[in-house]
Amino acid sequence: MADGQVLLMHAAGLHARPVVTLTKLAKTFASRIHIAADAEGPWVDAKSVVRVMSMRTPANKQLYFRAEGADADAAVAALVTLVNNDFLGGPE
Amino acid sequence: MSNVGIVIVSHSPDVAKGAADMVRQMVGQGIPLAWTGGNPGGGLGTSVEGILGAIDAAWSDAGVAILVDMGGAETNSEMAIEMLEPARQGKVVICNAPVVEGAVMAATEAWSGSDLATVKRTAEELNHDLD
C-alpha cells in the first residue's frame, strides 16, 4: 500500500487529454490504483478513463493517489511526478 | 505483443477522420487505427467495402474493435464482419458506445495491451451508471 498527493495546477483541470495521459501511465503498473480529489474520497479506479473523467476535477484541487500491489510505491511516485510535470513526459 | 486495433465508422468522413485524429493525439501511435466514412459520391454514408478496408488497415491478431455512429454504420459493419473469413470473424466486435468518446476509451484500453473483450467493455462503460 502506497499513497501520495499532489496539487493539480493544470489550468483546465483534469480534462480529457490529461485524463488519458494519467490513465495510460496508471495502466503501466500492475498495482490497483485509485485517485480522489478529496482525502475522504470518493476513490475511483485510476486506470479507467471514464471514471477519472467523471470526477470533473478543476484546477487547484489536491489529488490523492493510493495503490496496492508490488509496484505500488513506483506507481504513486510516477503519477505524482506526472501531475507535477503538467502531464508532460507520460508514456507514448 | 500486438494491441487490439480500432476502426471508426461514421456517415461523415469528417467525423470519422476527426475522431481518429483525436485518438492519435490523445492516445498516441501505439495502436492500429483506421477510419472510414462517406459514400463514393462524396455524400454521407457508409459502405461495406470501406469498412472491410478499414478492418484490414487496423488488423491485429488481438482483434479489432469497431465504433459506429448510427443506423447503416452498424448494419454495414455487421455485414462486413460476416464477409470476413471465419478465422477473423470472431476477432472483430462492434462496440455499443458513442463513436468519439468510445474510440478514445477503447484506444486507451487497447494501448495498454488489454484483450478485445476488455476493450469493448471499457468503451461500453460510457453507457452505464458509474455509481
Image (cartoon, rainbow, N blue to C red):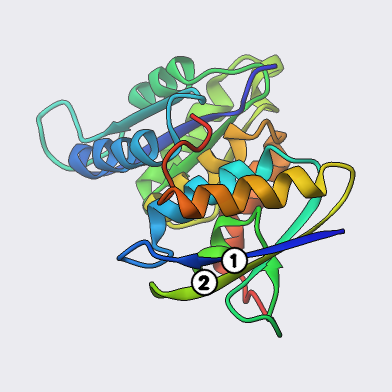
Q: Are marks 2 and 1 in contact (CB under 8 Å)?
A: yes
Relative to B10, is B28 on the left or the right?
A: right
In the foreground, A72 or A25: A72
List x then y, in percent, for residue B73.
38, 43
List x then y, in percent, for residue A16.
40, 57
Task: Residue at 45%, 46% (x, y): give it.
Answer: B104
* Figure check: B109 above or below B64: below
Relative to B18, is A8 on the left or the right?
A: right
Task: Residue at 45%, 45% (x, y): give it.
Answer: B103
Q: How many marks?
A: 2
List x then y, in percent, for residue A87.
44, 48
Determine which of the numbered discs, if any, sits on residue A51 in the image: 1
Q: Residue furthest left?
A: B42
Task: Residue at 48%, 28% (x, y): give it.
Answer: B80
Separation of disc 2 and disc 1 at Cα?
Answer: 5 Å
Name the subunit of mark 2: A
List x then y, in percent, for residue B22.
32, 42
Name the subunit of mark 1: A
